[in-house]
Image: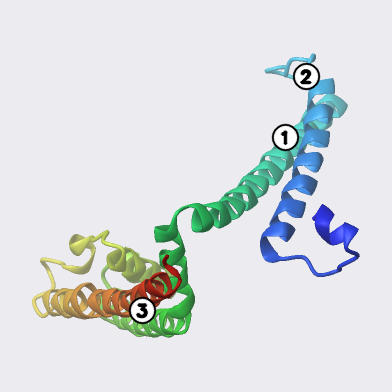
Amino acid sequence: IFDSINTKSNQLRLYELFDLLVILLNLLSQIYFLIIFIFSRDQFPLKTSNKEEFIFWQNKLETVNLYQKITGISIFFIIMRLLKFFMVAFPIFGMVFQTLKFAYKEIIAFFLLVCIMLGGIGALAHSAFGYYSIKYQDLSWSYFQVYLMFVGIFDYGSMSDKDITNSIAPIFFVIFMIIFNLILINLFISIILNNYREVKEKYQKFNNVYSI
């Protein structure tokens, strides 16, 4: 940052912007911490009948919550800044990030495909199980249940009902497992592996050319 100022350059690199944001957020969080510390001598009363006192403690609680949020955002940018250090200090981390950089278009297309398929299957689950299962009666909750199935949290009992003789729950469950847990997961792994292989070959060629 200081080099950019000394050279009168207005262009800051991404990780330098992260540094600047971390500094500003840390200063702001320290200001809020001092505000909290000034009023920390007073202990919060368990019972209060004074409306002004209640409003005072409510405002103090909002200040503490804001301090926590600012600190959390600051920690996030610190971690993002540390990623640059790991990329430079450890080449294997650089290969991983380069893999994600090369494969970002395919990853975006993959997740769009997953979202579209989850949307269709969520609507199917709502129409198939919504009339007897409380978890699928609402369309939004049906989408949420399908998402939980995608990440590995299954509740087969909410789909099946012993009073329903022609339930499609077993067929739905098997097709869902085949499409998402076998086909799509392996497709995502193949996307990452193919791009990682290309990045690894480029790193090896670079090392061979510039090795002494």
Label 3 Cα crowd, 10 Å radius (few <14 / some 14-19 / many 20+):
many
Taking depth in this image into account, of 197 and 208 the one nearest to the observer is: 208
The residue at the point 45 percent across, 54 percent down is: 90
Going from the N terminus, do you reach mark 1 or mark 2 first? 2
Is 30 left, or right, of 100 in this rendering? Answer: right
- Tell us which disc is closer to us: 3 or 2: 3
Going from the N terminus, do you reach mark 3 or mark 1 first? 1
Q: CA distance from mark 3 to mark 2?
A: 54 Å
How are the residues colored? rainbow
Point out residue 193 in the picture as x, y percentages from the top left corner.
29, 75
Name the mark on residue 64.
1
- Quadrant of the image containing the C terminus: bottom left
The residue at the point 75 percent across, 39 percent down is: 62
Residue for badge 3? 195
Point out residue 208 in the picture as x, y percentages from the top left corner.
37, 72
- Vertical placement of 26 versus 201: above or below? above
Give the residue type at disc 2: Ser
Give the residue type at disc 1: Val
- Quadrant of the image containing the N terminus: bottom right
Going from the N terminus, do you reach mark 3 or mark 2 first? 2
